[in-house]
Amino acid sequence: MAWLSNNLLQHLQELVQLPDLSATRYRLLAKHAQGGMGTIYLAEDTQLQRTVALKVLHVPDASGEWSARLLREARVIAQLEHPSIVPVHDVGTLPDGRVFYVMKFVQGRRLDQYARSECALPNRLRIFQKVCEAVAFAHASGVIHRDLKPENIMVGAFGEVQVMDWGLAKIVAAGETGKTPDGSGHQLGDASRPVAHGGAHPTQHGTVLGTPAYMAPEQQRGEVDDIDQRTDVYALGAILRFLLYGPVPGAVAHKSGSRLFQSAGGGKIPKPLAAIVATAMAASKEQRYATALALAHDIERFLNGLSVSSYRESPLEIVWRWLRRYQFMVLLVLVYLLVRFLLFFWLRP
Amino acid sequence: MSKPVLGLILGTVLGIFDGLTALLEPDIATSPEVGSAMTGILLGSSVKGLLAGLIIGFFARKVTSLRSGLIFGALVGLALATLVAAMPDPSGKHYWLQIMIPGTIVGLILGYATQRYGKPTAAH
């Protein structure tokens, strides 16, 4: 009986929370997902006749604080015009005073779901490279994501990538993302879904925002002023670790040696990739990649069979990598030499 | 580096190497006129490699297909090697297999290299 009444209560609550879109050009289709600050609904843009995603605050916000946060989130995303960053189309206010924004409805799978089905390492790395490039673009625009994790990345059917959920993003002046911000920048907070505790204001010093397994040490310590693009680089390293080794529940590993992690699938991970993860996830910011682009560059070099900046190869490894890179060419040359050798003995008078 | 230039350089290098392997032939190596014989072989072999590389490089610039590149490379290598093999040495002896088989493989190498490497079009 209690279960029934709980379900009924929840259903009624959801009905009450359904946004009244009658005064807008959107028609509600279904509830899609729920976050800490708002709920995402699928809606139809009746003018353009396309499906969009609509993020609405859970409840009317008397203080205006959450409305301001949602608007700031929308403005942050709107600044970031990049193929791999979900675009915002519109913002507005419902008759009950709730603020909403409309964004592209992203179809595809979350990166964690994608990783479960996609076994080919190069494909995973190419997806990761696109994520790095999108994050690097945001950094260049003065935005630090602060909540990068596989659940916030969508992968489309054709390998297109969308970095989502910029609710925790921190804005610093463009070009200052590499330096320690002076704390004067705006900080956006989606307080409840990821970890958010430690202060009255979610982004005050001492407040912890983010998802533990993907949080850099400075972020875990709540050192808001110390957060810069290398904090996202750490999270990218944790995502790469996830793509290589699978989920590491609650583990936060820091650079201490050459091999840090055990592969979830039991497969052998190339040492340069392990070194890239270790460098990106170094406990000290100074030891990490300086930029997300530098990390992407190392991934690209690895994919092209070149050496990576974070791993010093032995001469044997250099030769082996070279042979692997030019394996077909080497094979043809060996065939040539073998033919020459055979002809020499076969046609010897 | 454009594909024709890559083909030209690689073809010449491989042609010289291919020519040097003539030293493995006892008839040539023990010949009293080994110097002049080798000069002719090296010259002919490097020109053959150069021509093959250039033709295969131009083909790679027009056609982007590893399979087609390999087939075309092998055919060009074989055709040029056949022309060279058709020329006998001063004693009238032909080296058909010694020239045609390695020549075909050199063509294959050139076909592969020009398809995989080098800029597809000339830089503007």
Image (cartoon, helix red, strand yellow):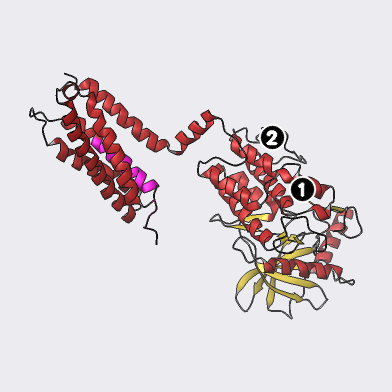
* Image quarter (top left, top right, bottom left or bottom right) of the C terminus of chain A: top left
Q: Position of residue A302 (x, y in %)?
A: 55, 42
- Crowd around label 2: few <14 · some 14–19 · many ≥20 (10 Å): some
In the rendered image, the vertical position of residue A177 relative to residue A314, given as above or below: below
Label 2 vs label 1: CA separation? 17 Å
Look at the numbered disc 1 and give the secondary structure of its residue.
loop
Foreground residue, B42 or A104?
B42
Q: Position of residue A55 (x, y in %)?
A: 74, 67
Q: Report the residue marked by disc 1.
A: A215
Do discs 2 and 1 share a chain? yes
Q: Report the residue marked by disc 2.
A: A261
* Image quarter (top left, top right, bottom left or bottom right) of the N terminus of chain A: bottom right
Q: Position of residue A165 (x, y in %)?
A: 72, 59
Residue A16 appears in the picture as rendered:
no
Furthest toward the bottom, the residue is A23
Q: Reading the chain from its start, which is encountered first: label 2 or label 1?
A: 1
The quadrant holding residue A142 is bottom right
Foreground residue, A108 or A295?
A295
Furthest toward the left, the residue is B92
Residue A127 appears in the picture as rendered:
yes
Q: Is residue A83 magenta?
A: no
Q: What residue range appears in magenta?
A: B103-124
Chain letter of the residue carrying label 2:
A
Chain letter of the residue carrying label 1:
A
